[in-house]
Amino acid sequence: MASFVIEGGHRLKGDLVPQGAKNEALQVICATLLTPEEVTIHNIPDILDINNLMQLLRDMGVEINKIGAHSYRFKAKDINLDYLYAEDFLKRSSSLRGSVMIVGPLVARFGQAVISKPGGDKIGRRRLDTHFIGIQKLGADFRYSSEKQLYEVSAKELKGTYMLLDEASVTGTANILMAAVRARGTTTIYNAACEPYLQQLARMLNRMGARISGIGSNLLTIEGVDSLSGCEHTILPDMIEVGSFIGMAAMTGSEITLKNASCRDLGIIPESFRRMGITIEQKGDDIYVPAHEKYRIETFIDGSTMTFADAPWPGLTPDLISVFLVVATQAEGSVLIHQKMFESRLFFVDKLIDMGARIILCDPHRAVVIGQGHAHRLRASSMVSPDIRAGIALLIAAMSAEGTSTIHNVEQIDRGYQHVDDRLNRIGACIKRI
C-alpha cells in the first residue's frame, strides 16, 4: 500500500494539462470489442483503472499496441470466449467496475458474455439493473450464480425495441447503446444519459458504421447494422480532473492555468465554482484561476443558503461533490452539500472534521459546511483514502493544511488521477510518495 506525505501550505503556480477522461476511456475501450478491425484511440490516461481494463482485454485476446505517449491501437479479431470463465478473469473483472461495459459489445458481436459482480469504490449501492434490464429488452437472457457471483448473458439475436430507462445511468446507457448498434431493427432509448463522454462514444460508434441519432439528448434512436469497422478517436480532457484542479487552486491560494480544457464540454462546472466565490477566466480553450486570498460562497437570490447537489447532465456531476465539499471548508459563508446518488460518498467528512473543518453531516446524503475562511486553516492529519473522489478531496485538504499530512491507500487516487503527485510537484507542491 502506497502513501502520500504532504507538506501543506505551498502555493502552486504554473500550467497543468488535464489527462484524458477516465469515464470516456472506459466506454470507448470496451467499444473496440464490437469490431475485428483496428481501432486507434488517442489521449488515453495512464491510470490504474484504464491500465487494468486494457490488460483484461489483452488476456481476452485483443491485440493492443502503444503507438504514442497516450495513443493505442486495438484489434479484437480473435477473442477467447473460454477465458471469460477463467478464475483469473472473474477475479480481475470483479475488482474493476468499468468491466461491466464489455457485456453489451460481447453479446452484440458473439451472442454471449460473462461478468463477475463488479466491485469499485465503496460509496454505497451501485446497482446494475439499468444495464441488465435494457439488454434483456433487446432479447438477451441473464442468469446469476450467487455461488460464483457471476452473471451469464446469452442471445441468439438481439432485436431493436423501445425502452424507458429507470435512471439516466451513464454506464448503463453506454452498455445498452453498444448492444443496440448490432441489434436487428430500430432501438429507441428514452431517459438516456447525455454526458459529453456518452456523446463521444456515440460519435465514435457512428464513425465505425453505426446509425445513432439524437446524440446529446436523452432520446437516442439506433438503427441496427450487421457489422462495424475500425476508426480513429480522441478522448476528451477529464472534466473531473479540471474541476478538481480548480478547487485545489482556490483552496491553496494558487495561480494555475489549465491548458486545453475543452471548455464547451464542462457544462455547469465553471459557473458552480463561481457561485462558490472562485474567480475563473476562460482564455481560448484554457482556464485561468488566479491566486485567491479568500472566496465567499454566494447565497440564493432570496438570501437562503446556497446548495450544491449532483444531478444527471447537464447538472453537476456527482464525481465533483467531494471536491466542492472540501473547498467549502475554507470559504467564507455556509453551504448545503447534497449528494443524491450514493449514500456512502459523504462519510469521508469525519476525516475533514478531525482536521478542524466545521461540517454537520445531516444524513448519508447531506452535509452542511460552515466555511471558516483562510483565517482558520485546517490541521495536518493522517488518513486513509476510501475512494477516488474522496481521495483527491483529502489531498486538496492536506495541501492547504498547516503541517505535514499522510494519506494512505493512495492507489485509490491513482485509479483516477494520472501521476498526480509528479504533476503537482512540478508546479510547487510538496508531495512525497512512499
Image (spheres, grey):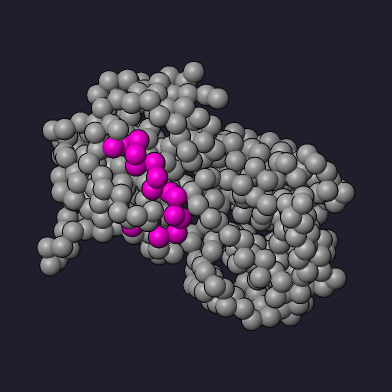
Position of 323 with respect to 211 (left or right) is: left
Residue located 48% across and 61% down the image: 195
Residue 323, compared with residue 7, is above or below; it is below
Residue 350, compared with residue 377, is above or below; it is below
Task: Name the foreground residue: 164 vs 214.
Answer: 164
Residue 394 occupies which quadrant of the picture? Answer: top left
> Is residue 352 in the magenta section?
yes
Question: Residue 58: image x %, image y %?
Answer: 76, 41
Position of 333 with respect to 58 (left or right) is: left
Question: Residue 281: image x %, image y %?
Answer: 25, 48
Residue located 25% across and 51% down the image: 368
The total number of labels drawn is 0
Q: Is residue 129 visible?
A: yes
Residue located 32% across and 20% down the image: 404
Range of residues picked out in magenta: 337-353
Residue 75, compared with residue 293, is above or below; it is below
Q: Is residue 283 visible?
A: no
Position of 107 with respect to 271 (left or right) is: right
Question: Residue 429: image x %, image y %?
Answer: 34, 24
Question: Residue 342: image x %, image y %?
Answer: 46, 55
Residue located 47% across and 24% down the image: 3
Q: Identify the image quadrant of the N terminus.
A: top right
Task: Name the foreground residue: 181 vs 356.
Answer: 356
> Is residue 77 in the magenta section?
no
